[in-house]
Amino acid sequence: MPTETKFDSEGFDLGASNSNNNESSEVIYEIGGGATSIAPPPIKEEEEHKSSESPIAEAERLKELGNNEFRQKNHLDAYDYYTDAIEACPMGEGVGPSGEELLKLREEFEEQQRERQAERHRRDMERRRGGQKTDKDGEDKKDEDDEENNNADDEGENGPVEFIPPRHTYGSKIAVYYANRAATSLHLGNHEEAIEDCDVALLYNPTYIKALLRRCTAKEQIEDTEGALRDAKRAYELEPTNSVARKNVARLQKIEEERLEKLKEETMGKLKDLGNSILGNFGLSLDNFAAVQDPNTGGYSISFNQNK
């Protein structure tokens, strides 16, 4: 009957390993004494570099390439590099939403706000009409939804009236990529796209001055002077020493005032035409009426002149 061979520490030279060997080295003890140390394979320099690299290092590299192309006025190439930088950023759970997801979340929030406003308007109309509900016996009954509606009103008044986007770990960096791409879109004449990219940049970083000023420029190009002025004012509030913001506010304020005055004249002209068309049926026109201001009270009275 064959005997079973047993192995124990006897016959192994446990102190034979070289104490100077790296602790991570693998030591193989040999039967009969002696030991062999096997060093682990060296870590490649490239792998060491990758392990210590920031998660957005590649995105930053692509941004710099885009900046170089932008300086040379190669705006299409710069646009592509900024797009690559955006796509190279980590997104998702534990990091933060993408730009497309932020826009979708904002759109959903604004839709909810519109629905709440419509519901409040509907309830206000019902209250003004004084429509008291009655039961099947014809007796008045209290609206069972009154308390719920009042709570909804309170929630709407105390709840957020402005969209607050979720944070992103690298939000300030991503905002730069979007704002830079917006700058290339301005040079390429794609003003709507520039506005959207600035929207995303400001969702990532609401106090980003460059994004506000670039969106201001894009809005002015599509003749949205009201929106452009709003962005210029916001930039000036955030940074009162910014000369570009200050000049934009002064210039756009004048343009907006002229626009509103022109709009008022056009509106008054249309109302006058409408009034004359009605009064013409009676052989009259608005020229038969004159508004006279009372110097004491500042109020107006209407005088009628048949001969005009």
Image (cartoon, helix red, strand yellow):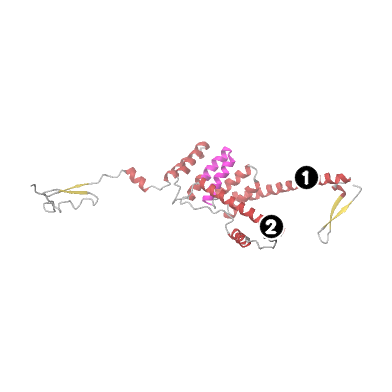
Which amino acid type is marked by label 1?
Answer: Lys
| Marks 2 & 1, CB-CB < 8 Å contact | no
Q: Residue furthest right?
A: 307
Regarding mark 2 in the picture, which secondary structure is present there?
A: helix
Image coordinates of residue 262 in percent, x first then y, are: 73, 46
Q: What's the residue at 35%, 47% (across, down)?
A: 51
Residue 188 drawn in magenta: yes
**Left or right: 25 as drawn, with respect to 75:** left
Image coordinates of residue 87 in percent, x first then y, are: 46, 42
Residue 270, numbered circle: 1
What's the magenta bit mostly, secondary-structure-wise?
helix
Regarding mark 1 in the picture, which secondary structure is present there?
A: helix
Q: What's the residue at 32%, 43% (across, down)?
A: 45
Other-residue count near label 1 (Cα within 10 Å), few / some / many at <14 / 14–19 / ≥20: few
Against 42, residue 140 (above or below) is: below
Image coordinates of residue 78 in percent, x first then y, are: 50, 39
Q: Which residue is mark 2?
A: 126
Q: Is residue 216 visible?
A: yes
Most foreground residue, 186 or 160: 160
For residue 280, what is the image quadrant?
top right
Q: Nearer the viewer, mark 2 or mark 1?
A: 2
Image coordinates of residue 27 in percent, x first then y, are: 19, 49
Write down the region rendered in magenta. 178-205
Q: Is residue 73 visible?
A: no
